Amino acid sequence: MADEGRAEPGGTAGPDRAADPGGPARPGGTARPDRAADPGVSARADVDGDHEPDQVADHRADGPDRAAGGGTRAGRTRWWSRAAAVARRLPEPWGFVLAVFAGSKLVLSLIGVLVLAAWDGVPGAPPPAETAMRAQQDAISSHRWFSLWFAWDSFLYEHLARLPLDRPWPDFGFPLLYPFLARPLAPLLGGHTAWALLLVSNVALVVQLYYAYRLGGRLLGGAGPAGGRRAVRYLLLLPTAFLFQAALTESLFVCLALAAFWYAERGRWLLVGVVGYFLAMSRSVGFLVVVPLALVLLREHGWRAGPRRWPRLVRQGWPLLLVPAGWLTFMAFCRWQSGDWFAYQHAQETGWGIRLQNPITTAASALTGGNSADALRVWIAVATVAVAVVGLRRRADWPYLVYTLVMVLVPLSMGPPVYKSLLRYLLAAFPVAFVLARWARRRGLDGWLTAVLALVQGALFAVWLTYWTHLII
């Protein structure tokens, strides 16, 4: 998604740079004589509007009354300076990534606890159909800020992670990468498989933000750190991005997809194949990502694929065969355990009524069917496609346009049963976040986009927590 725009005016980093705890120290942040006298802050540069050294010295000299208060302003300044210094020592962009992850986790957890506390006071809440799930959440933890990140499919993944491997496998409805990653972690967490699942999701989210920073900075016209930070911000502002924090497969899938495209853009095709192998094992749609990845390879060759170029294309791109091989591995597992290569498909048909259909027909059915919730979901899918088509219409961006279309049309091809989870599946369309980040180079638009997306996500987060309408999952 090459950005034809220019760098920030004057070459300075905008508000995004100011928010980066891992960014360089400000000019003039050298140690001065009064700072050098204090070994606790002698080597630290001023951080994002923190107190100047003179101010710190003044606060420390305020007398015994302030010192006796315990939580002194100087103490807080010293703590922040130390934290910022540690963040600056981390390799770029890990300081920024970890700060954004921690901040988003804190904000969403706080909002979640407040919403649940308010909802619990509503007569008839939770709805009768949700009481069993609430009991499952309480069994995981009595702390609402923790248990709220488990819902519906989370408990099915926990079941798969607990199934013994020395007996015939009975469940084929989900690919196994996510629950199997939790297996070796559970013993380290006292046997809490659910905790292990949440840990996998959150570690994947941190790595996902790293690759979003790298890939976003590269695709936004070489905008550098400011572009990478905007890409991360808008990825976390997508309407249902709070699901990245939950014990679900979203963060793992998007992490692997971003990594695959990052290595493809750098021409490291063996790594693309290895990452793509696991991508295909994380979700059924993953093996189709081989198509947009192959378009990246074709773009490298000037979109020419004549017979004279085949040897070079094969020599470079053969690792792409590993991507569908990941899904074939799961199919082989189904065949080994059940005698049926398509046990996954049959489980989906039996359990959820999913059958391959025309995605356009499925979308039209929702828009004309009279169910406002279904119509809203599909309109959001239409908006996702519209943003992608407008923002990724340049030829260099076609791999990401094709990827987005796959992430929207394949779920719709499952038929009406997909409606309830459609907003969750759309979260995989990460190029939309990069398009918004590119449009946000205009400062005024950046503020409006940020505010609107934050409000939309907050509303959807509250709806998801209450499960009143089942709008999201």
Image (spheres, rainbow, N blue to C red):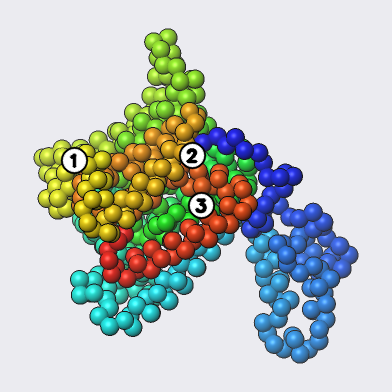
Q: Do the residues labelled 2 and 1 touch (CB within 8 Å)?
A: no
Q: Residue at left 31%, top 59%?
A: 472
Q: From the viewer's perspective, is 406 left or right of 173?
A: right
Q: First in sequence: mark 2 or mark 3?
A: 3
Q: From the viewer's perspective, is 272 left or right of 449?
A: left
Nearer mark to the viewer, of 2 and 3: 2
Query: Please, what is the three-letter code of the amino acid marked with disc 2?
Result: Gly
Quarter holding residue 21: bottom right
Q: First in sequence: mark 2 or mark 1?
A: 1
- Judging by the rendered image, the residue that carries numbered circle 1 is 356
Observer able to see residue 456: yes
Q: Do the residues labelled 3 and 1 touch (CB within 8 Å)?
A: no
Q: How crowded is mark 3: few (under 14 residues within 10 Å), some or many (20 or more)?
A: many
Placement of 462 over or under 227, stated as above or below: below
Given residues 49 and 193, the one toward you in this image is 49
Q: From the viewer's perspective, is 25 left or right of 222?
A: right
Q: Where is residue 448 in the image (x, y as percent from the top left)?
A: 55, 57
- Judging by the rendered image, the residue that carries numbered circle 3 is 234
Mark 3 lies on a secondary structure that is: helix
Whole-angstrom CA distance, mark 2 to mark 1, is 29 Å
Q: Residues within 10 Å of mark 2 (few under 14, many from 20)?
A: many
Quarter holding residue 318: top left
Q: Residue at left 40%, top 57%?
A: 240
Q: Position of residue 86 (x, y in %)?
A: 65, 60
- Judging by the rendered image, the residue that carries numbered circle 2 is 391
Residue 128: image tag: none
Whole-angstrom CA distance, mark 3 to mark 1, is 32 Å
Q: Residue at left 20%, top 71%?
A: 129
Query: Please, what is the three-letter code of the amino acid marked with disc 3?
Result: Tyr
Mark 1 lies on a secondary structure that is: loop
Q: First in sequence: mark 3 or mark 1?
A: 3
